[in-house]
Amino acid sequence: MGPMVRIQAQAVLYHNDLGSIRQTLRAVANAARYAREQRGLEIAVSMAYGDSGETPLPDEQELELWREIAGDMPVSYRHFGFNAGSAHGQNLLAEGFDGDYVLIMNPDVKPCPDFFHQMLQPFGDEKVAAVEARQCPVEHHKDYDPATGRTDWCTGACTMIRNRVFREVGGFDWKTFFLYCDDVDLSWRMKLAGYTLVYQPHAMVYHAKELSGEGGWMPTRAEMVYSAEAALLMAWKWGDDKRLGQLLERFKRGGEAEKLALQSYRKRKREGTLPEKIRADRRVATFTGNYYGKNRFTY
């Protein structure tokens, strides 16, 4: 029997639906039990929540219900007292954890029963730093090698990361990224440190997505602004000056979201708070059209 593998699943809350959180807790706890009872894995899974809302989302009665649902899986909760965003919030949750893996996930993601067994498989290779789950019913469009699972980056929607590597590279760059591209940037820094990233299609999670009648993504105003801002910051940080120039020109003629992102970028530049540039080998930083890696699907 090998040593106990310790995994901390963690999610940042912001005005989330309580019913969905309960469903996720039930699914994570069930997947942990399945891994132990059906797969014989020696794993200890805990769940950590950080709340970025103005006031605490759960009251004491709700927290007690969460712990009842989780059973023998420990559940912790902290109210940040400010809007930490995804990157800072995830870093804060990981600070005190000294176990083997951090599972970065959205609070509305529900893993399948065999989730932990499948997610841990690629980590048999010591060079693998992170493993990304397959999202259903809308699979992520990123390409991956069907033989090795290698991919350009891993999404923060549901990715397991070696804790020692997460700490080695400094976690998420929260001073640069608030909501979007924090996961891409972290992935590329792990690759820059010599590690590989793997997409695991056998580890399935349900991730509800609200789509238009044509099957397209319907982003909120905040998502549009922060994703536009992140596009500029990624081009700056990873040294793609041509892409940065093109985005700056396009955003001048863009809508509200693009113009707000442009204002934020210019403010950072004036104040000298843009991140230090990383002029990395292009095998690490992959800019493809409007994406950060090759696409599996053609639109």
Image (spheres, helix red, strand yellow):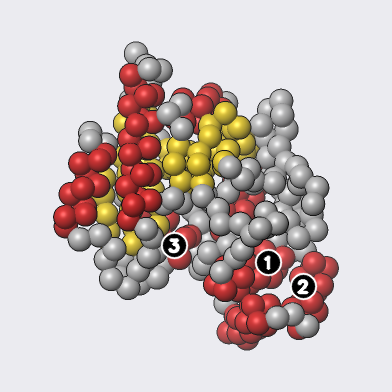
Q: Residue at x 39, y 64 (%)?
A: 14
Q: Secondary structure at mark 1?
A: helix
Q: Residue at x 23, y 35 (%)?
A: 71
Residue that protrudes farthest toward the top in the picture: 1
Quarter of the image for residue 13 reads bottom left
Q: In this orientation, which residue lies closer to the viewer: 80 or 211? A: 211
Give percent across and percent down for residue 96. 31, 50
Give the residue pinned by disc 1. Answer: 231
Residue type of the residue flagged with mark 2: Leu
Give percent across and percent down for residue 116. 44, 30
9 sits to left or right of 79? right
Between the residue at mark 1 and the residue at mark 2, the CA separation in whole angstroms equals 8 Å
Between the residue at mark 1 and the residue at mark 3, the CA separation in whole angstroms equals 18 Å
Against 230, residue 127 (above or below) is above
Determine whether label 1 and label 2 are within 8 Å by CB. Answer: yes
Residue 88 numbered tag: 3
Answer yes or no: is residue 19 visible.
yes
125 sits to left or right of 12? right
Between the residue at mark 3 and the residue at mark 2, the CA separation in whole angstroms equals 26 Å
Residue type of the residue flagged with mark 3: His
Q: Quadrant of the N terminus?
A: top left
Residue 247 numbered tag: 2
Q: In this orientation, which residue lies closer to the viewer: 250 or 234? A: 250
Against 35, residue 206 (above or below) is below
Q: Residue at x 38, y 44 (%)?
A: 24
Q: Mark 2: few, some, or many residues within 10 Å (few <14, many ≥20)?
A: some
Answer yes or no: is residue 127 visible.
no
Marked residue nearer the N-terminal end (1 or 2): 1
Determine whether label 1 and label 3 are within 8 Å by CB. Answer: no
Q: Secondary structure at mark 3?
A: helix
Q: Secondary structure at mark 2?
A: helix
Callout in the foreground (1, 3): 1
